[in-house]
Image (spheres, rainbow, N blue to C red):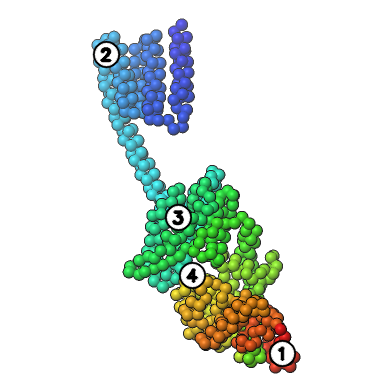
């Protein structure tokens, strides 16, 4: 009967233990109170198991169980009050049971109880000190880890989230399938300020830009720095395209206001490109590509504006990405080549120079259109590599031509923004032995408009070396006449859009005649581009144009044909064609 009762008590204790564990400790984030209650109940189950055992079948040696339990409770209590209460309960029970024993045994058990009390208190104190030290160490480690994480996620210069932090957030939003807008903002004109005034001023200007952007406090927006003068913004996906453009344009307007940095009045502009998840891209990489494509479109065609990616341009963007990949992986030294288009002087009745035109025959893409691969090279940062290869080939060909023939070579905006690169081109000229006066560098309005002062300084360096400077596509841009006054020019190339209209537009004829006269007064050479028919030439001849470039006097041709043309300048057939009367 005694054995059955004790077995029943043990079974009930086990079931109670399982019930407490499932009901109180099932939650992974159990509170301290719940843990404390669970610990108390576990200790009480052990205590009552021993107590019932003694009440059912008392044996004097079993009293030591209370002392053992006190030691166990001193190490298993969740909180100090639970520990002390269960230890005292065990020792009090020992004392009460020991009262029934003879005085000699009673004294022994009292001594055991006192020793157990001291041992339990000591163990409790030591254990908690060790636990507290572990907690302090863990808290310190967590604090240091948090600081390290903060440093890893913060841009050290500006204090805003860095590239890693921003893309971690973007990846999280993509994983959660939460709609959002990604925008890339690039400063216009910052590099020139950084080059002229140094990195200290440049860094302070960047901080000032960030402070101004932060002050806008756009609801739900996160603003970070990718690197250099490029920033990234995350906007809620619930807002529409029009509102995104409005926020972007307002931000650009705010950023573009003048700054005062150490008594210097500085100005930078900005352009932005935005793309939406998930409607415009299903991954962070796709979204970045499309926002970057929109940014490039803004910088090349709509500088100072916010452009949202147009899904209709998806094919164009994929084509641009394919071209960028080939620019990285192909042997450009072998695949890039030049064609040469003549510039004809009606007065001298001969070709006086050629414009070098870039061409690319790629093994995978075939013949790539120049406007496509030049834009892709600019966007991907490969344009200076392309320029360097083509310039070397043009220079080598020029050395084979008669000394009175010049070569006109196009430079991109990125080319003229890098003074070190321009100096490397001058070094190639000096090493070649070709006279700098035979070389002419063509620039467009869009190439210089981002930072007129820096462009002017670089062009003056080129001109001081003896090279000539030509302004291409004059009249097709924004404020052409300002550049005539501001830039060190030797030649102006009138855009073909005017020439094509001279046959049927009195206004175009007056414009072309006026430009020819203006260039003559300013002592600038003037090239009329796009002259293709005899009728156009008949109208232009009375205006006494300086130079003509167009299919009428020669299509773009390979190097060996250009050499043959200049060597046959006095050929009778060429002379007759060039001097024949032109019919309307």
- Residue 517, percent across and down? 55, 86
Q: Residues within 10 Å of mark 1 (few under 14, many from 20)?
A: few
Q: Earlier in the sequence, mark 3 or mark 4?
A: 3
Disc 3 or disc 2, which is closer to the eye?
3
Disc 4 or disc 1, which is closer to the eye?
1
Residue at image mark 3: 224
Secondary element at image label 3: strand
- Front-most of residues 454 and 29: 454
Outermost residue to the front: 506
Disc 3 or disc 4, which is closer to the eye?
4
Q: CA distance from mark 3 to mark 2?
A: 77 Å
Residue at image mark 1: 581
Q: Earlier in the sequence, mark 2 or mark 4?
A: 2
- Residue 433, percent across and down? 56, 87
Residue located 44% across and 32% down the image: 29
Q: Is 346 left, or right, of 136 in this rendering? A: right
Q: Residues within 10 Å of mark 2 (few under 14, many from 20)?
A: some
Which quadrant of the view contains residue 311?
Answer: bottom right
Residue at image mark 4: 450
Disc 2 or disc 4, which is closer to the eye?
4
Q: Is 475 left, or right, of 254 in this rendering? A: right
Disc 1 or disc 3, which is closer to the eye?
1
Residue located 34% across and 15% down the image: 63
Q: Is residue 579 above or below residue 144?
A: below
Q: Residues within 10 Å of mark 4 (few under 14, many from 20)?
A: many
1 and 3 marks in contact (CB < 8 Å): no
Q: CA distance from mark 1 to mark 3?
A: 66 Å
Q: Earlier in the sequence, mark 4 or mark 1?
A: 4
Residue located 66% across and 91% down the image: 349
Q: Is residue 52 above or below residue 346?
A: above
Residue at image mark 2: 106
Which quadrant of the view contains residue 61?
Answer: top left
């Amino acid at each position: 009967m005694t054995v059955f009762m004790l077995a029943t008590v043990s079974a009930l204790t086990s079931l109670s233990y399982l019930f407490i564990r499932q009901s109180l400790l099932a939650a992974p984030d159990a509170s301290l109170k719940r843990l404390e209650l669970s610990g108390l109940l576990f200790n009480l189950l052990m205590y009552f198991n021993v107590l019932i055992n003694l009440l059912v079948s008392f044996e004097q040696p079993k009293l030591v169980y209370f002392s053992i339990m006190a030691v166990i409770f001193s190490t298993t209590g969740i909180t100090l009050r639970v520990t002390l209460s269960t230890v005292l309960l065990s020792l009090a029970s020992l004392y009460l049971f020991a009262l029934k024993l003879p005085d000699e045994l009673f004294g022994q058990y009292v001594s055991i109880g006192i020793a157990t009390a001291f041992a339990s208190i000591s163990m409790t104190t030591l254990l908690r000190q060790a636990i507290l030290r572990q907690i302090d160490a863990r808290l310190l480690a967590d604090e240091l880890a948090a600081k390290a994480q903060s440093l890893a996620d913060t841009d050290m210069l500006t204090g805003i989230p860095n590239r890693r932090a921003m893309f971690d957030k973007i990846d999280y939003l993509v994983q959660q399938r939460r709609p959002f807008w990604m925008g890339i903002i690039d400063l216009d004109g910052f590099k020139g300020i950084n080059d002229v005034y140094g990195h200290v001023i440049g860094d302070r200007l960047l901080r000032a830009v960030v402070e101004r952007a932060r002050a806008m406090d756009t609801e739900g927006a996160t603003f970070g720095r990718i690197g250099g003068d490029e920033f990234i913004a995350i906007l809620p996906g619930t807002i529409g395209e029009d509102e995104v453009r409005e926020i972007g344009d307002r931000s650009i307007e705010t950023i573009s206001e003048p700054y005062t940095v150490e008594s210097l009045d500085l100005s930078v502009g900005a352009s932005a490109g935005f793309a939406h998840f998930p409607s415009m891209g299903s991954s962070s990489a796709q979204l970045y590509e499309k926002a970057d494509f929109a940014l490039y479109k803004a910088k090349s065609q709509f500088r100072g504006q916010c452009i949202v990616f147009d899904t209709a341009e998806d094919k164009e963007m994929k084509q641009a990405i394919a071209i960028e990949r080939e620019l990285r992986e192909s042997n450009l030294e072998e695949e890039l080549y030049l064609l040469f288009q003549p510039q004809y002087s009606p007065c001298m009745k001969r070709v006086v120079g050629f414009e070098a035109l870039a061409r690319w025959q790629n093994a995978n893409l075939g013949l790539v259109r120049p406007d496509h691969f030049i834009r892709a090279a600019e966007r991907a940062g490969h344009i200076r590599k392309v320029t360097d290869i083509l310039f070397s080939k043009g220079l080598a060909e020029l050395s084979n031509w008669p000394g009175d023939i010049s070569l006109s070579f196009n430079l991109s905006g990125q080319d003229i923004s890098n003074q070190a690169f321009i100096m490397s081109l001058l070094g190639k000229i000096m090493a070649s032995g070709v006279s700098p006066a035979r070389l002419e560098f063509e620039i467009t309005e869009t190439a210089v408009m981002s930072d007129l002062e820096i462009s002017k300084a670089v062009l003056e360096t080129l001109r001081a070396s003896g090279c000539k400077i030509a302004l291409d596509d004059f009249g097709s841009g924004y404020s052409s006449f300002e550049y005539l006054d501001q830039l060190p020019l030797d030649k102006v190339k009138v855009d073909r859009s005017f020439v094509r209209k001279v046959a049927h537009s009195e206004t175009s004829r007056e414009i072309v005649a006026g430009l020819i006269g203006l260039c003559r007064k300013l002592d600038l050479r003037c090239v009329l581009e796009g002259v293709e028919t005899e009728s156009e030439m008949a109208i232009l001849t009375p205006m006494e144009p300086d130079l003509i470039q167009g299919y009428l006097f020669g299509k773009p041709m390979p190097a060996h044909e250009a050499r043959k043309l200049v060597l046959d300048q006095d050929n009778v057939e060429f002379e007759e064609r060039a001097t024949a009367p032109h019919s309307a």
